[in-house]
Amino acid sequence: MIWRKLLIPFTGAYHFLHLIDKHLKERRRYYSDLPVISVGNISTGGTGKTPVIIELIKRFNKYYPILVLSRGYGREKKDDVLWSVGEPIPDIALFGDEPTLIADFITNGGIAVSTNRTQCLKKIEQQFSEHLVLLDDGFQHYQLVRTIDIVIVDDDTLEDRLLPAGNLRESLTSLDRATVILASSEKGITCLRQAVSSSIPIFKFKRSVIPTNSKNLASDQEDRRGIAVCGIGKPDQFLSSLRRDNVDIISSKIYPDHHNYSRTDALEIQRLFEITGSEFIFTTRKDAVKLVQFENLRNYLLTVDLQITVDEKFYSLISEKLNNRSL
């Protein structure tokens, strides 16, 4: 946005205040007895943290019980809440949309949601004494010491400015704290190689969409036409992924990240669906957990997962560092 360029003079003040905040929090750092893997970024908005957490769960839940630690962005109530496998599906109002959808992938473990994740972990780590902790959006959570810091960087991040003139929470130099970086392109890897220490591994990741219900995106043309609805950090990436998979998006309805859909929203989506003569409403799993409550939409939702694929060497590196910690 052009108007944000007017805020460039204030980026220095933001950076200064951020450094003070970081210093104060690091003075109260907590060393948990549990292994902690943070998945984060240096920008506001979505870069793919939740899909990476889900992939880590798929890979490591057979070896470790997993505790996901989240702030629960967008939830209606701010109390500390805890969910364990075997209990009813988490309430979105209490946990937020991302923890609710993540719960579907955990086969052994739980989820803790709190506005103060470090204090929450202190209270419950004895209860989860054998668990691997996945810290959601944790790169700026300086109070908690991590075993592994995974940072996701897309091309938009590389071309952005610090807040408030842009969307960067920290500059690229902060990436020197990372254990490993996931970049979205070869161009990104080249840029990062010039900006961060050569000792930090960088892997390219690929985004794709896969259907989570019975319809297949690769089926006949009629089955691939519809409207797209989402409330995520970077909706353009979702729409681009659908089009790359030859989905015919007739129109789209975009809402703010973590949007809590209302009955009015559901009626607006229904009108767009009917006017365009669509067959399906393509949406993300993160949105579907909220849209499924509306009977007028439920039967037309075709939910897709935003999936991230990374080289096997990335997972080998994570395993090696976890194994070294236990020695």
Image (cartoon, helix red, strand yellow):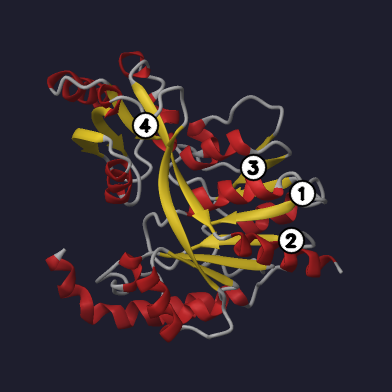
Label 1 vs label 3: CA separation?
A: 14 Å
Secondary structure type for disc 3? strand
- Residue 152 at what x, y percent from top left? 47, 64
Label 2 vs label 4: CA separation?
A: 38 Å
Asked if the residues shown at circle 1 and circle 4 are in contact, with their CB atoms under 8 angstroms apart, the answer is no
Asked if the residues shown at circle 2 and circle 1 are in contact, with their CB atoms under 8 angstroms apart, the answer is yes
State which tag comes first along the sequence, 2 or 3: 2
Front: mark 1 or 3? 1
| Labelled disc at residue 64 | 1
Label 3 vs label 4: CA separation?
A: 31 Å
Label 1 vs label 4: CA separation?
A: 33 Å
Front: mark 2 or 4? 4
- The residue drawn where x is 53% and y is 50% is 71
Label 2 vs label 1: CA separation?
A: 10 Å
Label 2 vs label 3: CA separation?
A: 15 Å
The residue carrying mark 3 is: 111
- Residue 60 at what x, y percent from top left? 70, 50
- The residue drawn where x is 52% and y is 36% is 101
Amino acid carrying mark 2 in the image: Pro
